[in-house]
Image (cartoon, rainbow, N blue to C red):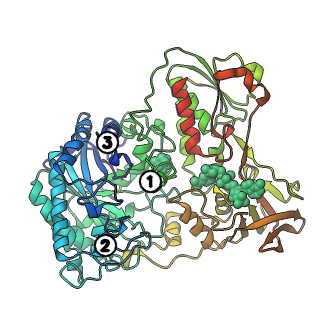
Amino acid sequence: MYPHLLAPLDLGFTQLRNRVLMGSMHTGLEEQRGELTKLAAFYEARAKGGVGLIVTGGFAPNFRGRLHPFSSQFSTASHAQKHKVVTDAVHKHGGKIALQILHAGRYAMHPLSQSASATRAPIAKFTPFKMCERQIKGTIKDFANSAHLAQSAGYDGVEVMGSEGYLINQFICQRTNTRNDKWGGSYQNRIRLPLEIVKAIRKKVGQEFIIIFRLSMLDLVEQGSTFDEVIELAKGLEQTGVSLINTGIGWHEARIPTIATQVPRGAFSWVTEKVKPHLSIPVITCNRINTPEVAEDILSQGHADMVSMARPLLADADFVNKAASQQSKLINTCIGCNQACLDNVFKGKQASCLVNPQACNETEMVISNAVTKKRVAVIGAGPAGLACATIAAQRGHQVDLIEKSDRIGGQFRLAMQIPGKEEFRETIRYFANRIEQTGVNLMLDTEATFDVIKDYDQVVMASGVTPRKLQLEGIDTPEKVVDYQTLIRDKSPLGQNVAIIGAGGIGVDVASMITEPETHTLADWLEDWGIDQTMSGEGGLQPIGESVADKQVWLFQRRAGSVGKGPGKTTGWIHRATLQKRGVNLCGGVSYQKISADGLHIKRDNKEELIQADNIIICAGQESVRPFEEQWQQLGDKLHIIGGADVAGELDAVRAIRQGTEVAMKL
Ligand code: NAP
Ligand code: SF4
């Protein structure tokens, strides 16, 4: 079904069983104290699931190259010894694994950071020390030493992290390299470091060891590399002994989204396609490839020889095996939200996955068969109820999933209608197929009552939320005021001037939805963010396209401070930048006075103002839906409350699906 994706790749001295590379992603498991059992179990599940080649999260070759003072390093025999459990776990299932060697350079979050020059990154707290000749030579040796140790630990190869704005990238680009010795100045001098590193590694590890180089093909920052320079380095790397070239897109400090859900699927494979004809070694492409269809399409068009996916394999460890066995409709697709993976990592927490809470918890969250088969009622087919019902049924329980409306999905059904959040549709598709696979009895258009559910052995209340009603004069004016749920569901018509009350995740989504341009092709999207598909200039940048909306929109919150970021740690800036580009008025520190025929009356800086809005959209959070709550006590400890029915205040799909899964595992 996916002949290109599932075809083996011959590297001469070794063969990869298919074209799927699990891209490097830091999960937090790398820093586990003692045995690396959790990290081993995480990769073992992906190897068992059929991945061709796994690349670990980044390990520093020396102390100064660490991202954080306590983050992972791989530079001693004891490190190598500790990693054997990881490589053995992967090899047991016929997989292959490479260790990524990453020197953070000026992105390091500690005061000993080093770089080509002493300039601080806009996203870093510390100004790095400029490396002297001795330190550069020492670092080259350290990379080679790590690779050699990785070989002794049973790794099949290493990936040298040369992109995303880390140390090697900092040497390559004029933006961060202002040296005038043999490591700076001309391009030939600036690329000396990556070439010397690869040369030193190859010398240490011999010919029969995979070396992947993650090459920044599109820096997306000013004073980044030009296309000709990228090709010059790629050819140099090939000659120096690299086995595979992986694509890197965008420095971490770039203000252009590269992996968030708003980024169209496969949005950057054209970059790899441009580089590939200049090389004879295989080339890997990446970014927002999340289904076997997208991957197959890219490979069959010849854009690349392999595809890299990281988050999609967090979302479903069995991605490859499901694709290979005609079960792709059962793939739990990554929706690109970052909410449980990157947002967690950037907050210093362990990664997991919104749609798959078992990710990175493989040793604790084990789904076993139920000892006693029970009759279980799950009320509500939103994300929490769906997760709970399908896992309970998988365990052998007899599950009735009772849903008041005529379809499943709950809040995800609203989310998928927001432009750029269409991926939420995939989660609903996944659960619809899981209902069929696990034998859940789905009862749509059915109102749960106490009399109906009181005789079940277990009752799970996943009845969700309803938009909060505000106490405000004029709020009951349906021709003028609409809550977000009605607006999205009924596609209510709006006038030219619109005020939004509430700038949380949903207020931001609604503002983005109502200002979305009508057509939005990949070319439009690239132009909107100033990405030059001809790659003729430095860093692949061009002036940002004009995209001011034809509506006048105000987004309000009562809290003072930054407005429009929404809740995502790694995606907030994208939302805010999008709204700013579209001319949305972002206003904090307001109080709402009343709604009249003229519009919304607010108070700001102690002054009363009239916002002449034709429509006012209420996005002021939610309240729990708790049917027959007065009788819940009678259900005793057979009642379990999950998702929005449990806590509406911080309604959060990560918690909802995790709670649903955890409850189902205990029933
Ligand atoms: P929210 O993030 O809690 O925001 C509610 C907004 O309503 C806030 O801006 C709050 O701001 C305002 N508000 C609260 N009570 C109010 C009142 N009585 N009168 C007027 N304004 C009031 O809730 P949400 O936007 O409904 O989102 C719900 C959840 O969905 C989020 O927590 C998030 O987990 C999830 N979500 C996530 C994303 C994402 O991109 N990651 C997107 C959408 C939703 P002030 O109190 O300052 O006025
Ligand atoms: Fe994908 Fe979201 Fe899961 Fe991260 S948390 S792997 S982005 S679905």
Q: Image quadrant for the C terminus?
A: top right
| Vertical arrangement, residue 638 with respect to residue 116, above or below | above
- Badge 3: how crowded within 10 Å, few (<14), some, or many (20+)? many
Residue 417: x and y, percent? 64, 52
Mark nearer the viewer, 2 or 3: 2
Residue 348 shows which numbered tag? 1
Specify few, some or many for label 2: CA neighbours under 10 Å numbering under 14, 14-19, or 20 or more.
many
Q: Which label sits on residue 51?
A: 3
- Residue 166's place in the image compared with 462, above or below, is below
Q: Amino acid at mark 3?
A: Val
Sequence-wise, the earlier of marks 1 and 3 is: 3
Q: Is residue 644 above or below residue 490?
A: above
How far is the residue under mark 1 from the one under mark 2? 24 Å
Residue 324: image location, x then y, percent: 36, 37
Tag 2: amino acid: Gln
For label 2, the SS is helix
Q: Position of residue 613 (x, y in %)?
A: 81, 68
Amino acid, disc 1: Gly
Tag of residue 170: 2
Please name which of the two marks, 1 or 3, marks the residue nearer to the observer: 1
**Residue at the location (34% across, 60% down)?**
67
Mark 2 to mark 3 CA distance (whole Å): 31 Å
Mark closest to the chain's N terminus, 1 or 2? 2
Secondary element at tag 3: loop
Q: What residue lies at 35% left-to-right and 36% top-to-bottom?
A: 45
User: Is 633 left or right of 42, judged from the image as shown?
Assistant: right
Mark 1 secondary-structure assignment: loop
Q: CA distance from mark 1 to mark 3?
A: 27 Å
From the viewer's perspective, tell me whether residue 636 is left or right of residue 61. Answer: right
Q: State left or right for residue 42 relative to residue 385.
A: left
Image quadrant where one finds the N terminus: top left
Between 515 and 105, which is closer to the camera in this rendering? 105
